Amino acid sequence: MYKTSIFQLQIVCDGCNNYITVSGITDFDTCQNCGKKINVLSVINNNLFGIMHKDKYLTGFLSGSIEQLGGSGAYKLSYSSMQPYCEECFVTIDEDSAVQAISSGNVFKCTKCGHIMPVRAADNLLLEFHPKAVGVLNDANGIDSGERNTEKDSMLVFKCMTCGAGLELSSKTKRTINCNYCDNDNYLPDSIWTKLHPNKEVQPLFLILDIDEKDIINTIEYFLSVTALKIYSKHFDNFIREYFERPFVNDALIWWLKEFLSAENNKQVEFNMDMEKIQKNFLNNVKLSFDSHPIEIKLLTAEFGKNMDEELQYKLAKDKDEKVRLALTQNKGLTKNIIKLLQSDNSATVKKASAKMKTNFLSKLFGK
């Protein structure tokens, strides 16, 4: 099942201390300001997620900004776990369509506006970045059939500052160019250099992973068991906020919510995040605009939601879809009033499923 990780990344050049835009998951990139080679891969692999396990973070449904300040190696990362989208018209792209383009080796063409986005299948470098990578959509190092960034091949003519001979320049020209006529070196002024290497906007990179249930379970267990991760709890909350602004459903998200909603805090580990608090944030969002949520979200909440308040339990118990009410009968955390409501349901199936549910405290405590 596919899961998308979205990046927008800038790295500080150790030559001129300016931020450069990273337009692909690559080993080296060229600074648009001074022409120095930047070891992008070193920053990505060694610094980008700080104390976080990179693979676990990318597998999880989180969103946030991570920034490291101060000179060489500094960076700004914006990260999201939403679905890929067209960078031109922002229409959502389903992962199956993106993977089909990646597998076929063709560019991805937006079905709404026709915008071309390069694709890149998983190579050794991408697999080093994440072992479950399928490929990247919108990576500047991908296949674009020459239809994107065409300005890179344009030529400029610059006169040698010693003899006046014409020097042909291109995007591959180094900052210092040797004159073939007088053999003197010319250092290209900023006005020429920036024409050859214009500052690029921070474009999103859509890394698509092919993960399984075990990957998601291991990721949840990681966040519950590792200390000093409390500061990253806001990245769970950020994703919850983004999700309810632009809801979607796919297999990976369903499995994630199943494990996330049923997870319990690890009482043996101090200083880790409060999963119960994050779960309540999700449940509060489900309660808002309840009728507009996809059926899959209601089903997952009904069966696996822990610590639901009675208001949300009531909404689920009165939902018009029998499947939601039936899923609620599997939840062990319902109040006495909600259990009685289910036991008097108009559906014989729901009534039968809820008949064995216990409504007194001692029965719940001892399972009798």
Image (cartoon, rainbow, N blue to C red):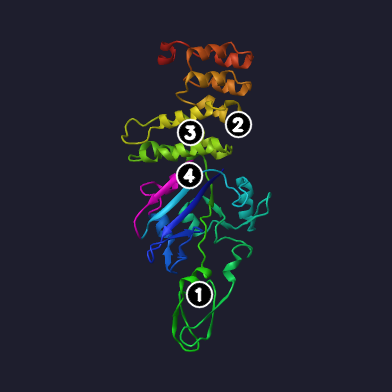
Magenta residues span 47-71
The residue that label 2 is drawn on is 294
Q: Which secondary structure, mark 2? A: loop
Q: Earlier in the sequence, mark 3 or mark 2?
A: 3
How many residues crowd mark 1 within 10 Å: few (<14), some (14–19), many (20+)?
Answer: some
272 part of magenta stretch: no
Q: Position of residue 150 (x, y in %)?
A: 61, 66
Q: Is residue 252 above or below residue 331?
A: below
Q: Name the front one of labels 2 and 4.
A: 2
The residue that label 3 is drawn on is 259
- Residue type (three-letter) at the residue carrying disc 1: Thr
- Residue type (three-letter) at the residue carrying disc 2: Pro
Give the quadrant of residue 40: bottom left
Residue at 68% x, 54% y: name it: 114
Q: Which secondary structure, mark 3? A: helix
- Marks 3/2: CA–CA distance: 18 Å
Q: Is residue 112 above or below residue 219?
A: below
69 part of magenta stretch: yes
Q: Earlier in the sequence, mark 4 or mark 1?
A: 4
- Marks 2/4: CA–CA distance: 23 Å
The residue that label 1 is drawn on is 173
